[in-house]
Amino acid sequence: MTEMTVKAIRIHETGGPDVMRWEDVSVGDPGAGEVRLRHTAVGLNYIDIQQRSGGYPMNDLPVALGMEGAGVIDEVGPDVAGFAAGDRVSYCMVRGSYSEQRVIGADQLIKLDDRTSEETAAAATLQGLTAHYLVRDLYKVKPGDTALVHAAAGGMGLLLCQWAKHLGATVIGTVGSKEKAALAQAHGCDHPILYREVDFGDAVLDLTQGKGANVIYDAVGKDTFDKGIDVLAERGWMVSFGQSSGPTPLLNVARLAMKAQVVTRGGLYFFVKDPEMRARNAAELFGLIADGVLKVEINQRYKLSDTAQAHADLEARRTTGSTILMP
């Protein structure tokens, strides 16, 4: 067996950005059904911060972080069908992307077509497939809907605003600054709300003539969840898919009965674990990006070795759009 030494960002304990170490790791030959992948771009997502900080517990430390990457296959192991050395691919929801190279199951990969760059794939596979199941599967956005998107100027928020608008919804988004409001508005958000200056609940009710939003996409959690329930329309859907401000508060479900509302918790894993579903959804996602319907804004690039700074900037809300890490 051949082993090579590469660099990776790993943690040996949970905590702040300073717990991440840029260190040597060994990568061996791919086994049956596996490939060795050379990363050319790596995605940065809030789930990485949750894992690093202990918000999503892990019991197998030390580990390499990162849940999304793109690159080129260097070597294919036995019993791999449909992939060959030299293929450009991406993947998500498989931990360990903060590395120069890795071994990964071929059944986790998405083959990239000529219209999709590796940088775009690294920025958009996880967030884009999340947006897909949020607007196309979990709650199917339709013409005439009003959708409220929290953190509308982030990479996830920009994709949700564009896709919901493309499907015929009126889009309201919460943002933290005038600059972020302009960015969200340029990506399909009809009504950006500066949540530090106005109460977003009052603003949503004003904009909808008291009816509320048909669907709320909430990756913020503790700071927005309760007020969101108050501004849901009759038979409206609260779609919780993250907790950047902390876990959502406990919910008395009887509260929902007054308007026949629905609260659901998303989970990308359940929409990408089947290779056929993942490939189909990715084809739609990357097709819309290539056609210009969805624009992926890569507004920050960091060296992979500088991932601690990238985490600090994301947590401090100093970033907009998507961020990628360059090995």
Image (cartoon, helix red, strand yellow):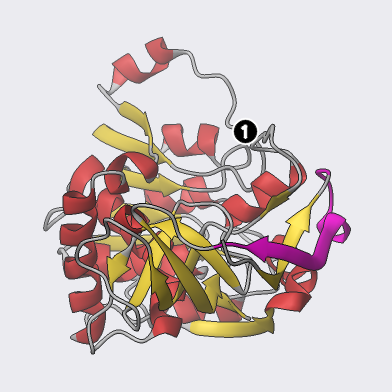
Depth check: give the residue in front, 268 or 95.
Answer: 95
Q: Is residue 322 covered in magenta?
A: no
Residue at 28% x, 45% y: name it. Answer: 271
Depth order, front residue of 299/56: 56
Specify whether residue 311 is in view.
no
The residue that disc 1 covers is: 247
State the count of labels.
Answer: 1
Residue 263 at what x, y percent from top left?
Answer: 36, 29
On the question of residue 297 being in view, the answer is yes
Q: Position of residue 79 (x, y in %)?
A: 26, 55
Q: Is residue 200 above or below residue 175?
A: above
Residue 217: where, in percent of width, then height?
Answer: 39, 48
Sort mark 1 into few (<14), some (14-19) or many (20+) by Cα contacts within 10 Å.
some
The residue most toward the right is: 18
In the image, residue 43 sits, relative to residue 115, either above or below, namely: above
Residue range in magenta is 13-28
The secondary element bearing badge 1 is classed as loop
Residue found farthest to the top: 254
